[in-house]
Amino acid sequence: MKPTKMRNKMIYRASYQTKSKQLGSALSKDLQKKYGKRSVRVNEGDSVTILRGEFKGVDGKVAEVSTAKSSVAIEGVKKEKTKGDKFDVFIHTSNLLVTSLNTEDKWRIAKLEGKDPRKQPKEAPKAAEKPAKEEPKKETPKAEEKPAKEEPKETKVEKKSEEKEDEN
């Protein structure tokens, strides 16, 4: 196969899983030492630094990940349209450096640490404390209050006809 066909197949016509794997970005030196890996897939909530392009040197959190564009939107990185509207700028993940990870996903952290996430001990379920049942309060019958009758609202047609009569 020609190189251009191979490139198109690998980048532009790749499956969803392959495109997801292509969203990797370099880890900072301290994270490389901690996890023993050089790169990681970028997720929402990760803190990153932009290494290349117009926004070089900007730090921020990943706001949105786009597998279709193979890039991410970062909080605080926006451009302005001529009408004044602002929109997110998507930056390719190869131009980013991950400085801190979003640790909410326990599976992801276990994989980074080299552990088998399936064999991780599950956290004990939290004991759901049930509040003591309160006795229903007995309601005393009250005199039924009837809402005051409201006068029918005037329509626009009636108002206009009244205004015409006043003028004559």
Image: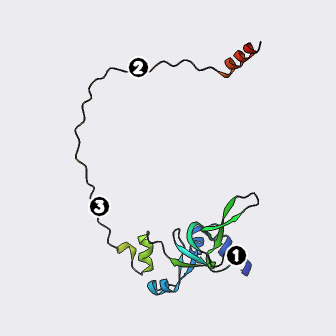
Marks 1 and 3 sit apart, C-alpha to C-alpha, by: 48 Å
Q: Position of residue 74 (x, y in %)?
A: 60, 69
Marks 2 and 1 sit apart, C-alpha to C-alpha, by: 69 Å
The residue that disc 1 covers is: 54
Q: Is residue 38 above or below residue 132?
A: below
Q: Label 3 sits on what residue type?
A: Lys
Q: Label 1 sits on what residue type?
A: Glu
Q: Position of residue 9 (x, y in %)?
A: 67, 74
Q: Residue at x 48, y 18 (%)?
A: 149
Q: Label 2 sits on what residue type?
A: Lys
Sequence-wise, the earlier of marks 1 and 3 is 1
The residue that disc 2 covers is: 146
Q: Position of residue 61 (x, y in %)?
A: 55, 70
The quadrant of the image that shows the C terminus is top right
Marks 3 and 2 sit apart, C-alpha to C-alpha, by: 49 Å
> Nearer the viewer's eye, disc 1 or disc 3?
1
Q: What is the quadrant of residue 76 in the picture?
A: bottom right
The quadrant of the image that shows the N terminus is bottom right
Q: Are marks 3 and 2 in contact (CB under 8 Å)?
A: no
Q: Which mark is residue 126?
A: 3
Crowding at mark 2 (Cα within 10 Å: few <14, some 14-19, many 20+): few
- Residue 165 as seen in the image, left or right of residue 67: right
> Between 17 and 142, which is closer to the camera in this rendering?
142
Q: Residue at x 45, y 83 (%)?
A: 35
